[in-house]
């Protein structure tokens, strides 16, 4: 027995053993480079444990890029309807007042311009005539284009909301309550708005009251929602380590 025991001891002398033999670490604890945690999994563990990994200065932070991009995205919590009227009125003032102050002198001059008939005779003013109606439509179109640019620029940005919506605590999202696509924002503020205003009796707006997700016709066309601002959905353990 003593020789067998000594032989067994000699056979393990100076060798790394698996498991807990010879006082070594468990095999599962020794991870190869291929078995190291992904940056997202490491960031998840750091957040859960309340620690911050130490990286050499100048090194590339693989987790910071993902966190920064996610942090710039706004998330929706609950679709809303009537508060949107308040935000719409605020945006109308923000865009409409400066436009009116700049365009009003030119509009008045065009409406007060004389209409010249055959032989160079003045037959009246542009105001009250078919030409006057064209002038009104021209300025309405100019305002609509300006309003569309204003909405698209802000709703497609990291803000995801016009100034009126931000003042009311609202954001524009996609169906998953995340950031909407540029195409969706353009659709809701161009063709969607056009169809919305062409349909009589403001049916496209009244749909907000009866739709479960508080969608107007322009929201349906753009695949968007207008919601109260929420927080980012937290990642679960199974999602990070899947």
Image (cartoon, grey):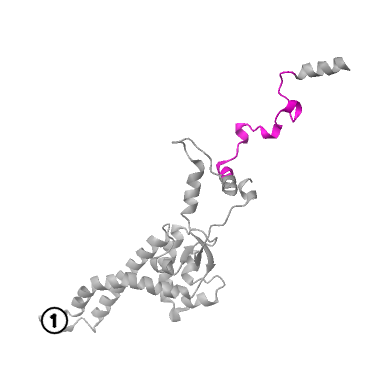
Q: Which residue does the image show at 67% across and 34% down from the upper left?
A: 29
Against 57, residue 223 (above or below) is below
Q: Nearer the viewer, residue 133 or 8?
A: 8
Against 239, residue 189 (above or below) is below
Q: Which residue does the image show at 44% across and 58% down from the upper left?
A: 182
Magenta stretch encompasses residue 27: yes
| Residue placed furthest toward the right | 1
Q: Position of residue 19 (x, y in %)?
A: 74, 30
The answer to which quarter of the image holds residue 134 is: bottom left
Q: Would residue 138 be seen by someone viewing this image from the given angle?
A: no
Decide if residue 235 is on the left or right side of residue 202.
Answer: right
Q: Position of residue 235 (x, y in %)?
A: 59, 52
The answer to which quarter of the image holds residue 23 is: top right
Q: Would residue 27 be seen by someone viewing this image from the given angle?
A: yes
Decide if residue 41 is on the left or right side of residue 9.
Answer: left
Which residues, given as a range, are shown in magenta? 13-42
| Residue for badge 1 | 118
**Secondary structure beneath disc 1?**
helix
Q: Position of residue 24 (x, y in %)?
A: 71, 28
């Amino acid at each position: 027995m003593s020789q067998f025991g000594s032989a067994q001891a000699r056979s393990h002398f100076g060798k790394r053993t698996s498991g807990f033999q010879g006082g070594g670490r468990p095999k599962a604890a020794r991870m190869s480079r291929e078995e190291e945690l992904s940056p997202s999994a490491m960031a998840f563990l750091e957040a859960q444990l309340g620690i911050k990994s130490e990286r050499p200065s100048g090194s590339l932070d693989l987790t910071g890029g993902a966190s920064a991009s996610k942090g710039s995205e706004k998330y929706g919590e609950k679709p809303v309807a009537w508060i949107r009227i308040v935000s719409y009125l605020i945006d109308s003032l923000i865009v409409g007042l400066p436009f009116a102050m700049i365009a009003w002198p030119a509009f008045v001059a065009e409406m007060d311009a004389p209409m010249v008939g055959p032989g160079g005779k003045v037959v009246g003013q542009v105001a009250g005539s078919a030409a006057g109606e064209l002038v009104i439509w021209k300025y309405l179109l100019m305002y609509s284009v300006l309003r569309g640019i204003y909405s698209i620029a802000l709703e497609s940005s990291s803000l995801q909301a016009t100034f009126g919506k931000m003042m009311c605590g609202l954001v524009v999202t996609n169906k998953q309550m995340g950031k909407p696509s540029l195409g969706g924002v353009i659709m809701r503020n161009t063709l969607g708005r056009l169809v919305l205003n062409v349909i009589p009796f403001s049916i496209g707006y009244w749909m907000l009251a009866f739709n479960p997700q508080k969608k107007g016709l322009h929201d349906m066309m753009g695949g968007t929602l207008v919601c109260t601002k929420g927080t980012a959905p937290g990642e679960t353990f199974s999602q990070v380590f899947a």
